[in-house]
Amino acid sequence: MKIEAHNINNTNIAEIISDETIIITIEDGLDLLGNVYYQGFDGIILHEKNLTPDFFDLKNGIAGEILQKFSTYRVRLAIIGDFSKYTSKSLTEFIYESNRGRHINFVSSISDALKILSA
């Protein structure tokens, strides 16, 4: 795992770069949050491929637990991916509602992620 730092409008954003799944459990998400938070980053960019597929199954609670911690610690998160492949109505609504707020956003590109997190 590599952290690529972006500084836009005095906002420090950590882009997590890895070819592997980084977040498999809730604890993995909390470890990443703590690591990035203590390095002084204001926001995090994660790629969909770095999240376990279970993250996108809302029934198991992984996404809810992890994203609640990001909100609690006021660390903004952008997840980059193609979310149109998910057919779950509850997930589609969850993504829509998340994107209406400022803390958790699901986007399709790095440029969209940087724009949202630096605004």
Image (tube, grey):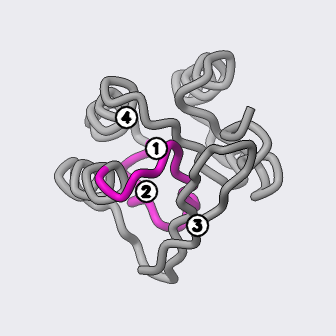
Tell me the residue that label 2 is attached to: 53
- Between label 3 and label 4, give the one nearer the viewer: 3
Tell me the residue that label 1 is attached to: 56
Tell me the residue that label 3 is attached to: 5
- Residue extending furthest toward the left: 27
> Which mark sits nearer the N-terminus, 3 or 4?
3
Question: Looking at the rendering, which quadrant does residue 58 occupy?
Answer: top left
- Between label 3 and label 1, give the one nearer the viewer: 3
Tell me the residue that label 4 is attached to: 70
Which amino acid type is shown beneath numbered disc 1?
Answer: Phe
What stretch of residues is rendered in magenta?
38-56
The answer to whether 68 is drawn above or below residue 42 in the figure is above
Which amino acid type is shown beneath numbered disc 4?
Answer: Phe
Q: Does residue 55 belong to the magenta stretch?
A: yes
> Which mark sits nearer the N-terminus, 3 or 1?
3
The percent coordinates of residue 8 (x first, y second) are 73, 50
Dot 1 and dot 2 residues touching (CB under 8 Å): yes
- Going by the image, does 40 lie left or right of 111? left
The answer to whether 98 is drawn above or below residue 63 in the figure is above
Disc 2 residue crowd, few under 14, some 14–19, many 20+, Cα 10 Å:
few
User: From mark 3 to mark 1, how far is it between C-alphas?
Assistant: 26 Å
Which amino acid type is shown beneath numbered disc 3?
Answer: Ala
Question: Looking at the rendering, which quadrant does residue 17 occupy?
Answer: bottom right
